[in-house]
Image (cartoon, rainbow, N blue to C red):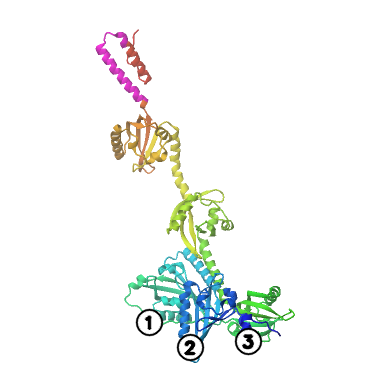
Amino acid sequence: MKKTKPSDEVSAAYIVAGQSEEITELLFHIDNSPLAIVEWDKDFIVTRWAGASERMFGWTAKEVLGKAITDLHLIYPEDMQVVENTMKKLTDGVSSRVVSANRNLTKEGRIIHCEWYNSVYFDESGKMTSVLSQVLDITDKVEAQKTIMDSHDRLAMALQVGNEGIWEWDQQSGIVGFDFAFHQMLGYVPGELPLTAEEWFTFHHPDDIPLMLARVDAYLNNNEPYYESEHRIRNKSGDWNWILTRGKLVQQQPNSGSHYFMGIALNINSKKEAEAELRASEEKYKSIFENVQDVFYQTDLNGVITEISPSIKYFSDFNRQDLLGGSVFDLYNDPADRHQLVGELLKNKELRDYEIKVKNKGGDIKYASINARLVFDENGTPTCINGALRDVTERMLVQEAMREKEELFSKVFQTSHYAITITAALDGKFIDVNDAFTVISGYTREEALADSSIGLKLWLEQREREEVVRQLKSGKVIRDKECLFMTKFGNVIIGLISAQIIHIKNQPYILSSINDITDHKRAEQALHESDLQYQTLANAGTALIWQVNENMVWQFFNKPWLHFTGLTLRQAITGKWSDWVHAEDFEICSSNFNRAFALRESFDMEYRLKNRDGEYRWVRDMGTPNFNRNGDFIGYIGHCFDVHHHKQLLESLEKKSTELEVLNQFFVGRELKMIALKKEINELLRESGHEEKYTIHN
């Protein structure tokens, strides 16, 4: 059976060197590995670029061979220190095998997360001659962990955890994760805490680590209900914070010692500050990483296994010899999956990250990701299938755990009788709504999630939403702010909204709840209807009506008053009495009003009031104290009448009367003129509504 050749640069190097067919086969498997294979010399110059290197990073072997690690722009700048520390460990001979995790940059500038499994070769004198690195792209796993943390953030907000933070620890990968509250508890912002257990343990007080790990072992081995530990963690200021952590085993990798923990953490500084003694220990913790164990295999087109790597033992518990010559169908959970895989291969010639379900020796289901391709002879006829299999069970279990957390969040989310929503802070697009929202708003969940609060015109006044968003972005938390909302059917409801900013995948969202208080407000509105009716009647008359509350603050002016003065309602309510009353009348008016107000008595007085043309006209103002149904004093109501014309008539009458008296004294003999004056006076009296004073004899 003819085998395909490995990549040209690798193959040429070894053929020139006269390597054996076994080496060629090994290189073939390396070339088809999902791992990137990179070899460096003692100066960290690239001497080999094989496996998935080009697929993972984008550079061809021709572009990188002979270049130093610092010339490749392969390392994410912020992780350069991690890489330099790893290089130092390798060159110092601390260990012949060093595992590290950091972010890398691809040729296109994309950021990926990688685990580097580095092994060092030393010559007889103990000097390093080369380094072989196997690189695994763990971006999907890291993003899955971040997605779980986003779910934690939402759950933490909905449950109002307060000062408790959420943490998780995957022992196999060494990845740790923390929610926003955990970061905040120690003074950090999201992203500042490490992603690996090895780095994270450097944040712990060294005296506390052994006891903490002993508690983990006790929990795992003694069937204790949960893990609990009190220990010190360094905050951003460099001080030690006492933290109480509780956690449980979420999942255990089958047939391995790896565990996946989740739990909560509580700041107990105040508790520990009151304690006189602190526990101490001299043991140090060392994190151990397990190397990746991918499986390489070859089958004929009928599914007979012709070659498989010994690493199958770690994946399935089968030994290599148990499977050689056997049928690959025995490993599939559903044989139909294998037929489908072959069909895809015949169609596409190769497969990348193709997921299947397989069985281990004990019959347990495992999840695997396959990279495979057809091998053709010189006539173009497919002869066999070469592939590499990776265990992704853990990732699938993480996704399942994430789904379970979503279900828990959904239960909490949906049981509230408040309308709870999560919307994008920028455009108001709905991310999630609970059942109470659909009842209150009238929109189905599907209608809401397809639109935004702006598009549905949920806010009766858009400026109210803008003000709420502005306050939230400034760092404030909204509590029971009264706003108006409109339902799908055009009904206006009054709600008390509480809201705060949350972050999901580093994007700002608004978590809000709305308490429908429309019925309560309707009851209050009924109390105001009588006032409205009174105002309607007041506006229909000619009297100038005003109203103040028990604190002498203007509350109401009717339309005739506003028309008379030329003021708007706002100007009248915010204005001063001294601005309207004639200066000569103000002091006596103010004194009369204050006296009546203090005694809760009615008053009746006349003064000059400035009209819309700036002229002062005489008015008669009659004020009455106002009491509510319970007999409580709530202010005064006053009625003003324009008596200016009447006042002028009286003044004219007084003037004419004076003139008459003068004429009587000095012109007694001029009877005719007296008669004329008397007639004029009588006429004025009649016009003013008084009886005639003089009888005229012709």
Is there a contact, CB below 8 Å, between mark 3 and mark 1?
Answer: no
Is there a contact, CB below 8 Å, between mark 1 and mark 2?
Answer: no
Secondary structure mostly seen in magenta is helix
Q: Which percent across, then down, holds residue 669?
A: 27, 8
Which circle, 3 or 1, is nearer the viewer? 3
Residue that extends furthest to the bottom in the rendered view of this protein: 124
> Residue tagged by mark 3?
16
Q: Which mark is residue 628?
A: none
| Picture quadrant of residue 1 | bottom right
| Picture quadrant of residue 527 | top left
**Viewer-side residue, 138 vs 54:** 54
Q: Is residue 390 above or below residue 520?
A: below
Q: Which percent across, then down, holds residue 136?
A: 55, 77
Q: Which percent across, then down, holds residue 330?
A: 67, 82
> Residue tagged by mark 2?
127
**Viewer-side residue, 573 vs 223:** 573
Please, what is the three-letter code of the amino acid marked with disc 2? Lys
Q: Earlier in the sequence, mark 3 or mark 1?
A: 3
**CA distance separating discs 1 and 2:** 37 Å
Q: Earlier in the sequence, mark 2 or mark 3?
A: 3
Q: Is residue 193 magenta?
A: no
Please, what is the three-letter code of the amino acid marked with disc 1? Ser
Q: Earlier in the sequence, mark 1 or mark 2?
A: 2
**CA distance separating discs 2 and 3:** 27 Å
Please, what is the three-letter code of the amino acid marked with disc 3? Val
> Residue tagged by mark 1?
281
The residue range painted magenta reads 645-674
Is 271 left or right of 224, judged from the image as shown? left
